[in-house]
Image: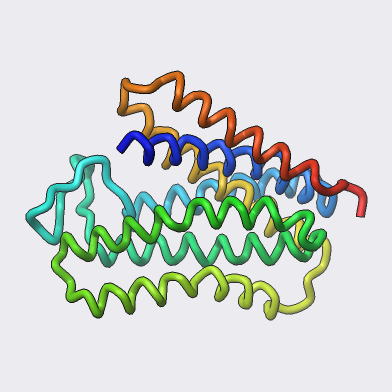
Amino acid sequence: HRRMQLAMSFIAGVMAGVAVLDILPEALEFGETKEVLLWLLAGFLTIFLVERFLPSHCHDVAQDNAEQTCGHEHQLTWIGTCGGLTLHSLLAGIALAAAWGAGGMGVALGVFVAIVLHKPFDGLTLIAMMRIAKIHPTKTHIANVLFSLSVPLGVVMFQFGGDLGDGTIAAALAFSAGMFLCISLCDLLPELQFHGHDKIALTLALLLGLGAAWGVSQLHHDDH
């Protein structure tokens, strides 16, 4: 439990840092400031609303029923979890493709690192919910494999979406930055607020994640 909390704090720092220090500056290079900020807000609200209406996590899940009440106003099911996380992953793939279009590996590396660090937790959530619902292991493995393909599918969708002008790249990057900020600030960090233990260690893990994001952002230059 302690190791998972530390990992979540570190990943929250990475995702927030990548959004602010890496993706957002690139978006501003390709688009107008006001439009970029509007797309940033749109990305934030999209993820927030998806999780509001397709809940994919819960602070307290019991172990004896397929549909569990969260203590909020919705019920948590593995189908809702799968739908919400798959949409997350598709958008993450779009973010990765947009970052690559903006400047190749130098720009895309930060997004790639954030996805690689965050997605195992999504997969763990999906598998855990399917096991709670007593879904057959074969179906669980199939769902896991299909879920793992959602990020590459997002990349393909963006690449074959037509002419990728500067405005499209700026919008996709800003939207992705808002998405990453929402996951970090609304999902990961609030989970840590429920725990009174290891405050210093969790804070250091968060700062380490921010430092890692800053380091990734220094690997490339802003002038293309």
Residue at the far front in the pictured view: 3
Left or right of 91, for residue 56 = left
Q: Nearer the viewer, residue 82 or 127?
A: 127
Up/down of 167 relative to 201, above or below: below
Snapshot colouring: rainbow
Q: Quadrant of the C terminus?
A: bottom right
Residue 135 at what x, y percent from top left? 18, 71
Residue at horizontal 66 percent and vertical 46 percent from the top: 38
Up/down of 204 relative to 118, above or below: above
Left or right of 99, for residue 165 = right
Residue at horizontal 47 percent and vertical 35 percent from the top: 9
Residue 93 at what x, y percent from top left? 59, 66
Q: Quadrant of the N terminus?
A: top left
Residue at horizontal 19 percent and vertical 47 percent from the top: 61
Residue 126 at what x, y percent from top left? 32, 61
Left or right of 218, for residue 20 = left
Left or right of 159, for residue 126 = left
Residue at horizontal 16 percent and vertical 64 percent from the top: 133
| Count of numbered labels shown in the rendering | 0
Residue 144 at what x, y percent from top left? 36, 71
Residue at the far right in the pictured view: 223
Q: Nearer the viewer, residue 6 or 61?
A: 6
